[in-house]
Amino acid sequence: MQTTTLSFDNMHNHGELFANMLRARHETFIQQAKWDLPEADGMEYDQYDTPASRWIAVHEFGEVLAGIRLTPTTTRCGIYTYMIRDAQRGLLDTIPTDLLFDEAPVAPHIWESSRIFVSNRVPAKLRMRVQMNLINEMTVSARAMGATSVLGLIPQNGPRWGRRVGLDIDVIGPVMDIGGARNACISINLSNKLH
């Protein structure tokens, strides 16, 4: 099992890994979760898949087992910035505008994690290992890019699970129903992961 952080700078070194990650996202979010998202050639993508983002893939023998997208909160592409902030600004009709207790931050040391998934194909006995690899690489990559915190919109039970695996998590928004699932915004403090 390998874990790789992809960027527009290095994806050419990793063959089809980026395309395979977008295919795994398609399977997870469009085929299984039935989300109405942009797609092409069996791949899911959106306006946040830009050169500013990074993608973390846990993979084995060409199959993507899990993934996360990291986007700086300082990024801009046309009218879009990052998903949580754009939802708060009313630009995304599928996510409520009141998803945060405070105004969405914009700072070079704060990144957003989105499109987090673990493939349903991962057997139960390997899920924890895959999740730990994903979280470890997210932490290492975010820190390497200067992040001291990472924001995310995750299932309601995510903060409890995250604390069990050693993440310093604060809930920064109300629990709300999004697409039939209970979710909340969180902030992961990476300051204690400096060394």
Image (cartoon, rainbow, N blue to C red):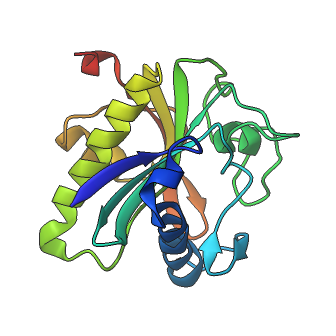
Q: Position of residue 76 (x, y in %)?
A: 78, 33
- Give the position of the N terminus as an image quadrant: bottom left
Write the residue at 61% across / 73% down: 43
- Give the position of the C terminus as an image quadrant: top left
Image height of 19 relative to 9, above or below: below
Write the residue at 47% across / 24% down: 145
Left or right: 158, with 182 as reference point: left
Quadrant in which residue 125 is drawn: bottom left
Q: Position of residue 53 (x, y in %)?
A: 59, 41
Of 53 and 127, the residue lying toward us: 53
Q: Most extreme residue toward the right, as rendered?
A: 78
Write the residue at 60% across / 61% down: 178
Give the mark count: 0
Q: Position of residue 137 (x, y in %)?
A: 31, 41
Q: Most extreme residue toward the left, as rendered?
A: 125
**Residue 157 in view:** yes
Q: Position of residue 57 (x, y in %)?
A: 39, 56
Of 167 and 38, the residue lying toward us: 38
